[in-house]
């Protein structure tokens, strides 16, 4: 004797989850493989010369550190404390204020890192490094 569910006309009472698990695992593997690449791009770090570059935002403030370790903000000479104060004020007025850093390539990596720390301490979330196209 056949039951009503065996004739194919009854309601579907079970869901096959195998395709759902397969797709979920593929998406998980893709995310695991690309996560390190995304994390490296969180702060744009390019060498002084690059074959490819992005056009800088026009409203970005420019922080420059030259080979003589003179610091300037949008062309105006500043000290580290003045830089932090002015960037904090800019972030207060516009929380998404972008900042572009132009550092001389002869500077030690540690000094550029300290400058980036000072900029982040002022509350800036969008920081990019200026590069020259080859």
Image: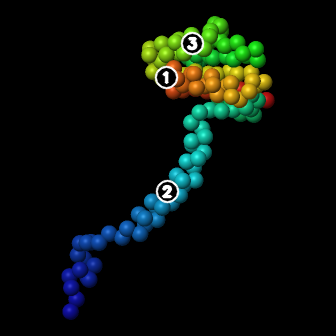
Q: Which quadrant of the structure image shows residue 55?
A: top right
- Give the answer, above or below, for where 109 lies relative to 24: above
Q: Identify the mark at residue 123; answer none if there is no mark.
A: 1
Q: Identify the mark at residue 8; answer none if there is no mark.
A: none
At horizontal 49% and vertical 22% (from top left) the residue drawn is 123
Q: Provide the residue designation for mark 3.
A: 81
Q: Please tell me which residue lies in front, 25 or 76.
A: 76
Q: Residues within 10 Å of mark 3 (few under 14, many from 20)?
A: few
Q: Identify the mark at residue 28; answer none if there is no mark.
A: 2
- Give the answer, above or below, for where 91 lies relative to 33: above
Q: Nearer the viewer, mark 2 or mark 3?
A: 3
Q: Does residue 30 appear in the picture of this structure?
A: yes
Q: Please tell me which residue lies in front, 13 or 38.
A: 38
In this rendering, position of residue 5 left or right of residue 36: left
Is tag 2's residue or tag 1's residue first in the polypeptide sequence?
2
Query: How is the rendered protein coloured?
Result: rainbow
At horizontal 54% and vertical 15% (from top left) the residue drawn is 84
At horizontal 75% and vertical 34% (from top left) the residue drawn is 51
Alpha carbon separation for disc pair 3 and 1? 14 Å
Is tag 3's residue or tag 1's residue first in the polypeptide sequence?
3
Q: Residue 88 placed where, x, y %?
A: 49, 16
Q: Residue 16 placed where, x, y %?
A: 36, 70
Contact, CB < 8 Å: mark 3 with mark 1? no
Give the quadrant of the C terminus.
top right
Q: Nearer the viewer, mark 3 or mark 1?
A: 3
Alpha carbon separation for disc pair 2 and 3? 45 Å
Alpha carbon separation for disc pair 2 and 1? 33 Å
């Amino acid at each position: 004797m056949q039951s009503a569910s065996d004739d194919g006309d009854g309601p579907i009472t079970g869901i096959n989850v195998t395709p759902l698990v397969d797709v979920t695992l593929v998406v998980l593997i893709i995310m695991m493989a690309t996560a390190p690449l995304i994390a490296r791009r969180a702060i744009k770090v390019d060498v002084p010369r690059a074959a490819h570059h992005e056009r800088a935002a026009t409203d970005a403030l420019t922080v420059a550190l030259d080979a003589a370790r003179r610091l300037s903000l949008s062309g105006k000479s500043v000290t580290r404390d003045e830089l932090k104060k002015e960037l904090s004020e800019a972030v207060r007025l516009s929380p998404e204020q972008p900042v572009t850093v132009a550092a001389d390539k002869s500077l030690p990596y540690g000094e550029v890192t300290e400058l980036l720390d000072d900029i982040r301490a002022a509350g800036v979330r969008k920081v990019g490094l200026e590069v020259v196209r080859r």
